[in-house]
Amino acid sequence: MNKKAKRRAFFICLAICLMNLSLAIKLAERFDIKRISDYTGHGANGLSVITPRVDDGKQEKTVVEEKKNDLKEMQTAENKETKVNLKNEENEIEPMFFITIPIVCHMIKNKVLEQDVLIPSSNNTWKKPMQIIKDKDRIGIKNISKLIGKGPIIRFLKHEDIKFRDGLDTEALLAGTGYTLDKNRLIDTFNNHVDENWHELFPYVVDRLAVVKTEKGFKFMEAKKLDLLDKKDTNRDAQWIMPDLKNLPIRIAIEQLNTKTGRIKVFGSGFVIDQSPKPNEAVLGDGDCIIYGRMSN
């Protein structure tokens, strides 16, 4: 073996020895480059990205607390939503005959309906719109709805932002059945459309609720809180004399009686042949009157 070959073999053996020596004393770890973080709890890991070292116990505790907070927030949100729903349910009512008043007032103002028109009602009576509403006369309200028509009533409800379900007939829309309405929205319709000509209707009671007129406008109150006994009813107390209606056309006779009472029954048609009470008899308040008619020959 020549000198050049021996020298090369020597260096190869030396390199192998040095490599084994470095492995034995872990020389690579002594000279490893590490990234340093200023944050406590961070560990250096060669040239890898430093990640925070979180204690397993603390991490589990944090997760549990986050879940508790999330659950608490969900319960709070549900409670708020429940309260809102309960509040809405308390304020929502079926408008019943209450909504009839502002609708009819609006239609009279806009010449869709005449204020003094006589409308066929229950028990063969003929009444003006206000008397029909006062008596909560279903047949009379049904006939008012026919006179007004469905289109104008729907336009009124939409203009007042009153929601109702599709498929309700004209009578249901006018009588306030089959849909619900917020009390405040309903009171707004009274303040917007019911004028002083209708104030004699109030307090207006339906079931356990009443609409009353105050200096600040209309409002709802419980019917049991009304002092109805102290309320003066001039129609109830006033006494009047029954006129002689014989031979008058039925329509003229009804108009004469309608200024005194809303309780008028009509049997037959044409001209009056008989009446009750009899002419010149005293009638107290909103008493019942009957007219018998027959066509003239």
Image (tube, grey):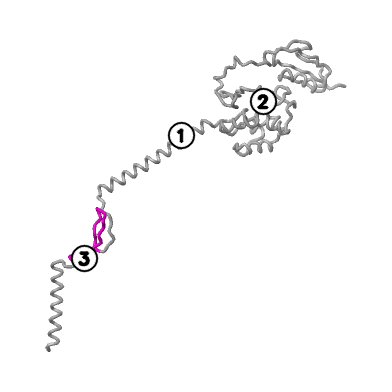
Which residue sits at x=71%, y=16%? 288
Q: Earlier in the sequence, mark 2 or mark 3?
A: 3
Give the vertical position of 233 relative to 52 (above or below): above
Provide the residue designation for mark 3: 32
x and y, in percent, of residue 165 in the image: 60, 38
Q: Quadrant of the C terminus?
A: top right
Which residue sits at x=62%, y=28%? 98
Range shown magenta: 30-46
Q: Quadrant of the N terminus?
A: bottom left
For label 2, the crowd category at 10 Å Cα-Cα, with few meaning under 14, some 14 to 19 and many 20 or more, is few
**Nearer to me, 117 or 277:** 117
Which residue sits at x=76%, y=18%? 257
Provide the residue designation for mark 1: 83
- State the mark number for residue 110: none
Q: CA distance from mark 2 to mark 1?
A: 38 Å
Provide the residue designation for mark 2: 196
Q: Nearer the viewer, mark 3 or mark 1?
A: 3
